[in-house]
Image (cartoon, helix red, strand yellow):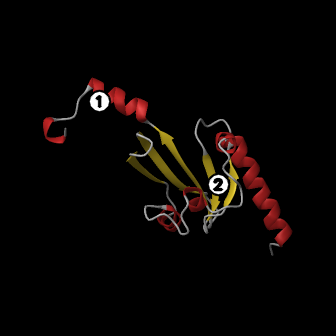
Amino acid sequence: MTTSIDKNSDKESIIQAFHQNWNLHPFPVLLLQADRTILAVNEPGRKLGVPVGKKCFQLTGKDKVCPYCQANTAMKEKRGIQVGSYQEARKQFVETFWVPLEGEEKIFLHYGNDITQWVKEELLVSPLPEQLS
C-alpha cells in the first residue's frame, strides 16, 4: 500500500528528475498535474517568472483550460502530441508538445519551442508553392 509520504517522495523524485532532464532546455518547460497545476518549471521558465502552483492557463489570463490544449488526449492515449502553429502576437512559429510521463496517470510535460528561425530559413531555401503564397 502506498502512503502519502511515499507519494510525496515519488513526486519529489519526479520533480528532481524533471530538473535534471530539462533545466538546460533552451525554452520553458512545465511539469503539470492533470488539473493543470504547475508542479515544476525548468530554468528558462523560472527566469521568465513562471510560478509553481498556478494553473498553466492562468499564465495567459484565462480562467479555464485553453481550447487548443491537447493534454487530456495525450494522457488518455498515453502518447506525446506535437502541434505546430504560428503565434501572430509574437510573430513566431512554435512547435508545441504535450507529453505524459510513463507510469504516471496524471502528470505531463508541456512546452513549446520557437522554431521561427528554421521556418524562415526553410522558406528562403524552398519558397511556398504559388497556390499557398
Amino acid identity at mark 1? Leu
In this view, the mark in front (1 or 2): 1
Q: Label 2 neighbourhood size at 10 Å, few (<14), some (14-19), many (20+)?
A: many
Q: Position of residue 109 (x, y in %)?
A: 59, 54
Amino acid identity at mark 2? Leu
Q: Which residue is at 54% across, 55% downward?
A: 99
Q: Position of residue 43 (x, y in %)?
A: 69, 40
Q: Is residue 133 left or right of residue 80?
A: left
Dot label at residue 123:
1
Dot label at residue 68:
none
Mark 1 and mark 2: Cα distance apart in space: 33 Å
Q: Which residue is at 67% across, 42% downward?
A: 21
Disc on the earlier residue, 1 or 2: 2
Asked if 83 appears above or below 128 in the picture, the reply is below
**Which image quadrant: the C terminus?**
top left
- Quarter holding residue 12: bottom right
Q: Secondary structure at mark 2?
A: strand
Q: Is residue 117 left or right of residue 72?
A: left
The residue lying toward the viewer, choosing from 110 and 47, is: 47
User: Circle 2 is placed at which residue position?
Assistant: 31
Most extreme residue toward the left is 131
Asked if 4 appears above or below 131 in the picture, the reply is below
